[in-house]
Image: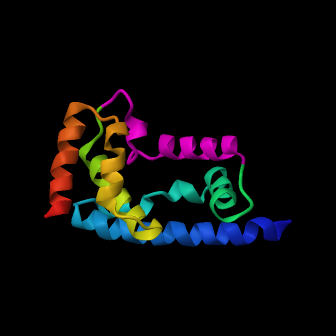
Amino acid sequence: MASEILWPLCHHVATVFRHKYHVARAGRSLGVSWRRCLIHDVSKLMPSEALPYARHFYGRGSSQEEFDRAWSEHWHRNDHHWQYWRGREMSEDAVREMVADWLGASAVYGGWFWDWYEKNKSRIELGPEAREILTRVLKEVGE
């Protein structure tokens, strides 16, 4: 029984740290503080997120309800997700980390950042100030 979760959990933890490495590289180039880079996605190591993620991505699967709960907890805990800010303006620090997160995810999980962004940008709910910051940060990425 323990082996059913041990290897998926090890794979998940390794993937989280690979992602954090790429987020830190992108984040530092975008002016994200070392502190934000270090704590980025640390909640993915908490049992309430790690176990459902490990089962979903690397094990025999978690229920959709379990995975959705873990994902919701993740963005409620991490201000670099636009969902965290619904109804409020997102800070510039969080916007910069969000873009670094997208770049880090692209590096680890495959795909091209700009393709992902074009496909998903209409779903990203931001206030006018945060949208302006995002536009500015994306120009920095493109330079």
* Total number of numbered discs in the rendering: 0
Which residue is at the far right?
1
122 relative position to 61: left or right: left
Percent x, y for residue 37?
37, 62
Q: Residue at x 35, y 67 (%)?
A: 24
Using the rendered image of the protein, determine whether residue 86 is visible from the camera's viewpoint: yes
22 relative position to 16: left or right: left
Q: Nearer the viewer, residue 57 or 37?
A: 57
Q: Which of 117 and 7 is in front in this view?
A: 117
Q: Which colour scheme is used?
A: rainbow
17 relative position to 85: left or right: right
Which residue is at the far top?
87
Percent x, y for residue 65?
68, 40
Q: Quadrant of residue 81?
A: top left
Q: Which of 14 and 125 is in front in this view?
A: 125
Percent x, y for residue 79?
40, 44
Quarter of the image for the C terminus: give it: bottom left
Q: Quadrant of residue 110?
A: bottom left
Residue 50 belongs to the span the image colors magenta: no
Q: Which residue is drawn at 37% across and 41% down?
A: 82
Using the rendered image of the protein, determine whether residue 36 is visible from the camera's viewpoint: no
Work out whether 126 lies above or below 98.
above
Q: What's the magenta region?
A: 63-88
Q: Residue at x 61, y 46 (%)?
A: 70
Q: Is the magenta stretch mostly helix, strand or loop?
A: helix
Q: Which residue is drawn at 22% across and 46% down?
A: 134
Percent x, y for residue 30?
22, 61
Quarter of the image for the N terminus: give it: bottom right
